[in-house]
Amino acid sequence: MSTDAGPVIGVFDSGFGGLTVLRALLPRIAGAHYLYLGDTARLPYGAKSKATIARYAVESARFLEDSGAEFLVIACNTASALALDEIRSAVRVPVVGVIEPGARAVFHALVSPFSTVPPESNVLVLATDATVQSHAYRNECGALGLRATEIACPLLVPLVEEGWTDHPVTRDVLHIYLADALKQCSPHAVLLGCTHYPLIAPAIAQALRELGCEAPVIDSAEATAAAVSQALGAQPTAEGSEATFACYATDSVEKFQRLGSRFLGQPIPKVDLLDLGG
């Protein structure tokens, strides 16, 4: 169900974080129309069982497909780590998660001109507890010849949602997490394994430099947007071909509209309330 100008693309997350993926997508695919669904009534997914996460994610994916999406982006690290196979089995359209594109972006950042990974290439993955416990990034990086050290940073999500992206408390918390992480590995790249973290990417890069680490910071949201654009063979948006979007949330549409605008980097004029059941 393409529009006259471009494809209809569904983007799914358990909450607000996936809006950073939508933000990265908007300038990449001319004329695209995005359907964003945040399952805010049932977050956080990380506290749920694998079976429950899969059920919730499949329900959301089917809603987006039934609403006309012809390509799905699972902009949720937990769902990408624990339910991607179930989602792909449940829908008829192509599905991309955030984990594989992130790992591949690190690989391409480190690969030599001769297309080989430097020996002993270490990747520091910053993520939530649920994503770290899944070891999805470790496994994906390992398949590419990279050694990943996964570090859970549970305080960062609430700090970002509070809007404290450049707050002294956030900088102090980052220093504590990163100082501990750098005792465990000497990374050649740092991968942001949570879709909230792009909002504090400059603070992360600054903290790393202050701790003596010059490793590049790889944004999995940007990596995912690039992978989707490549898969669709898309042209970047230009004047007159701007992408459009519609947002759905399963709870607290006013909060989604207010808080989501920070993640998207622009106002969200309307959020439709959606009931997916319990």
Image: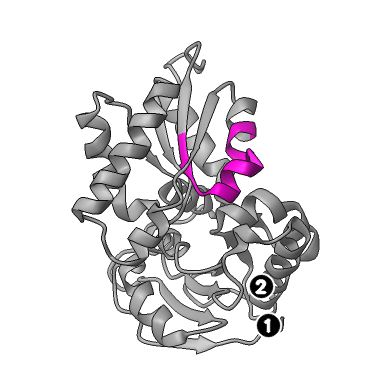
Q: Tag 2: residue type?
A: Ser
Front residue of 236 and 137: 137
> Do tag 2 and tag 1 residues touch (Cβ < 8 Å)?
yes
Corner quadrant of residue 30: bottom left
Q: What's drawn in magenta, residue-wise?
A: 125-139
Residue 31 figure quarter: bottom left
Left or right: 209 as drawn, with respect to 125: left
Q: Main secondary structure of the magenta part?
A: helix
Left or right of 101, for residue 267: left
Q: Which residue was labeled with disc 1?
A: 276
Q: Which mark is residue 60?
A: 2
Identify the residue shown where x is 70% and y is 69%: 56
Q: Amino acid at mark 1?
A: Leu
The type of colouring in the image is one colour
Horizontal arrangement in the rendering, residue 209 relative to residue 77 (left or right): left
Please say whether residue 108 is visible from this viewpoint: yes
User: Badge 2, how many Cα within 10 Å: few under 14, some, many 20+?
Assistant: many
At 64% from the left and 57% from the top, the residue drawn is: 79
- Which corner quadrant holds the N terminus? bottom right
Work out how far the residue at label 2 is from the one at label 1, CA to CA, in angstroms.
Answer: 8 Å
Queried whether the magenta region covers residue 103, the answer comes back as no
Between 62 and 148, which is closer to the camera in this rendering? Answer: 148
Who's the residue at 47% across and 13% down the image?
118
Q: Nearer the viewer, mark 2 or mark 1?
A: 1
Considering the numbered disc 1 on the image, is that residue within a helix, a strand or a loop?
loop
For residue 187, say whether it is visible.
no
The residue at the far top in this view is 119
Whether the magenta-drawn stretch holds residue 135 is answered as: yes
Q: Position of residue 277 (x, y in %)?
A: 71, 84
Q: Is 151 situated above or below 225?
A: above
Checking the image for residue 73, the label placed there is none
Measured as percent of width and height from the top left, residue 278 is found at 72, 81
